[in-house]
Image: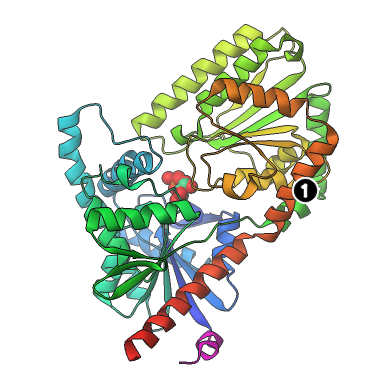
Amino acid sequence: IDRRESRQTKQRLLVVANRLPVSAVRRGDSWSLEISAGGLVSALLGVKEFEAKWIGWAGVNVPDEVGQKALTKALAEKRCIPVFLDEEIVHQYYNGYCNNILWPLFHYLGLPQEDRLATTRSFQSQFDAYKKANQMFADVVNEHYVDGDVVWCHDYHLMFLPKCLKEYNSNMKVGWFLHTPFPSSEIHRTLPSRSELLRSVLAADLVGFHTYDYARHFVSACTRILGLEGTPEGVEDQGKLTRVAAFPIGIDSERFIRALDQPKVQDHIKELKDRFAGRKVMLGVDRLDMIKGIPQKILAFEKFLEENPCWRDKVVLLQIAVPTRTDVPEYQKLTSQVHEIVGRINGRFGTLTAVPIHHLDRSLDFHALCALYAVTDVALVTSLRDGMNLVSYEFVACQESKKGVLILSEFAGAAQSLGAGALLVNPWNITEVANSIGYALNMPADEREKRHNLNFIHVKNHTAQDWAETFVSELNDTIVEAQLRTRQ
Ligand code: G6P
């Protein structure tokens, strides 16, 4: 088999993720769709040499056939194919198994503990729903698959999918990529369905993670829990090798850099500069998720203000907290907790004319976000755990003129790529974060510039596009190599 030859024919790429990159709103018989223009979407739908389609859940319940047909038709124009999940499945699979069990576990927050008996019982029904939902995704993939396609499955929602796909067709080229951390095998082994999930993922030809550590943890889980052999290439089971490797993601940096010159963004920048004149701007942009460490971050800011009275009217923290997974009780509790802390600190340090924390429970549009990144003096990305964290990348991309400081959690995947320029912190150590805030605000210009340049070069040179292309071409190579091995 000539590798170049296998590359020359234009392949189709089927991207399978829990969520389609669209928000769909029903207006009577028709649908209005807004495609989200993030880096991941342009990377996945824009992989050169491949014609990509995206398969996933549209995030809405469409019980009737007429609605489903209309939505399918509207989505086809955006190269998207829907998987229809009913409310009960969404509740058990998405809210339950994905977001209440796997998500916290993979971020080292453990399994739910409130009512052990109830949890154990609902655990099984949620896992059954998870498998059922994954099978529904597999059915849709199978319906659209033609020989030679590459199928790329994404994230913790779809760990069961590689197995389902290979059961349909053992020749299907299947890759699986995890966007969260993969935890230490000691954490993974607490999961009741630990072995079944690992075995399903191993059905893929190539398994990818953001960092080398996550890949290593996955291989350890397979060796320790399943008793398989780990090799430098991946995991081997009775002669079948599953390649395991790290593929750190990036952003579409040019999109952010270009946006800064647009009049809309310039107007926002001017407004923000006027609004916060005479004060240093600190910024947090996170989904309102317990892994993001928002309460800990705000408490560290409070400690900084407490210990540095001279800064009280000279600095403001803007915290954008984007609501997410609002049907899951843990997320509802977090919202109240954050509101309570912000209210207390603003009451304590606010004056008649200014408050130290501006907290927003919503997302910002792209232009407002770029402007905010550009006027920021210190960004606080202090996740308790995070697969990669692309907010840190976006901030760096928008800082060419300001050269602000990035305070970054050592537990975010991004610490491995932006660690040289950022101030790394342990987000659990509130004193350390408070001290880093002081250090960042007082940092001399030459040190800021040196640190920024290191990170800017990285963000510019490691794009989402490169990430997607590397993964897909490695998946093709993995298969070609496997074919060569069987022919020998
Ligand atoms: C994380 C996950 C993604 C997910 C996103 C938003 O980044 O890795 O797979 O899409 O959060 O969460 P949501 O539950 O709203 O899709």
- Residue 414 point in image, percent of width and height: 58, 47
Q: Residue at x 52, y 56 (%)?
A: 33
- Left or right placement of residue 266 versus residue 383 in this view: right
Dominant secondary-structure state across the stretch colored magenta: helix
Q: Residue at x 75, y 26 (%)?
A: 441
Q: What's the magenta region? A: 1-9
Q: Residue at x 65, y 17 (%)?
A: 304
From the image, tell me which residue sits under label 1.
453
Residue 401 is one of the magenta-drawn residues: no
| Badge 1 density bin: few <14, some 14–19, many ≥20, Cα 10 Å | some
Q: Which quadrant, please, contains the C terminus?
A: bottom left
Q: Compared to 17, does 410 lie above or below?
A: above
- In this orientation, does residue 136 appear? no
- In this orientation, does residue 477 appear? yes
* Displayed quadrant of residue 167: bottom left
Q: Which amino acid type is marked by label 1?
A: Asn
* Displayed quadrant of residue 266: top right
The answer to which of 242 and 130 lies nearer the viewer is 242
- Left or right placement of residue 326 versus residue 382 in this view: left
The answer to which of 73 and 151 lies nearer the viewer is 151
The answer to which of 371 and 419 lies nearer the viewer is 419
Whether the residue under disc 1 has CB within 8 Å of ligand 1: no
- Left or right placement of residue 143 versus residue 376 in this view: left
Q: Which quadrant, please, contains the N terminus?
A: bottom left
The answer to which of 263 and 119 lies nearer the viewer is 119
- Residue 353 point in image, percent of width and height: 75, 11
